[in-house]
Amino acid sequence: MEQNLIGTEKFDLGEIMISLCYLPTAGRLTLTIIKARNLKAMDITGSSDPYAKVSLMCEGKRIKKRKTSVKKCTLSPVYNEAMVFDVPRENVDDIHMVIKVIDYDRIGCNEVMGCTALGPMFVGLARDHWFEMLENPRKPVAQWYPLQEHVPMCATSSIPVNKCKTCHSRQTTIDSSDGSTL
Ligand SMILES: [Ca+2]
């Protein structure tokens, strides 16, 4: 499972800059997709139409997802789009976020260009970034992430059951209809 650890793959899929900001009292996590660079060309034009999809995960299940807008015909998109997630303080250690950069196609399936993930159960910069966010409440902390071919797995996959009660109660918001880009 070595390839699943962040930072062990080559950086040839480009990078994405992500900012995190946590408000402990409100239980609100703001993830901002700032920009990306050196993305892979997916279209015949030699360019791509990238957007980012962010999933809030708990115990392997998707609790919520958000998307940025599509930036047409660019390999260096700038988004500066913030996404707000409800994450109570008691659940902040149990969740993780999966970020996928996807090429929009008017016809056919949208293709994943690269992925990354962040949260307390990862290693390396994803974990460091997470704890920097927690140590600096109400302050946005930005970090570049190398994109990987596959969604990284958690370093600790054995999360005890019943550890995420609040997340469970919010699972009514899951939208499982979107299987096309998984
Ligand atoms: Ca395209």
Image (cartoon, rainbow, N blue to C red):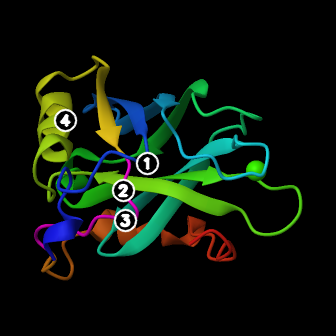
Reading the image, the residue beneath label 4 is 129
Contact (CB < 8 A) between labels 2 and 3? yes
Give the residues drawn in magenta, as a range. 147-156
Query: Which of marks 3 and 4 precedes in the sequence?
Result: 4
Q: Secondary structure at mark 2?
A: loop
- Verify CB contact (< 8 Å) between mark 1 and mark 4: no
* Location of mark 1 (residue): 13
Rendered residue at 40%/37% (across/down)? 15
Distance from label 4 to label 3 (Cα)? 17 Å
- How far apart marks 3 and 1 lie (CA) works out to 13 Å
Mark 3 or 1 closer to N-term?
A: 1
Q: Tell me the number on the disc at residue 148.
A: 2
Does the magenta-highlighted stretch encompass residue 148? yes
What is the CA distance from the residue labelled 1 to the residue labelled 4? 21 Å
Disc 1 or disc 2, which is closer to the eye? 1
Q: Residue under label 3, please give it.
A: 151
Of marks 1 and 4, which one's residue comes earlier in the chain?
1
Q: Residue at x 16, y 77 (%)?
A: 1
67 and 102: which is toward the camera: 102
Q: Which of the two discs, 4 and 3, sits closer to the camera?
A: 3
Amino acid found under the numbered disc labelled 1 = Leu
- Labels 1 & 2 near each other (Cβ < 8 A): yes
Q: Earlier in the sequence, mark 1 or mark 2?
A: 1
Q: Is residue 98 visible?
A: no
CB within 8 Å, label 3 to label 1: no
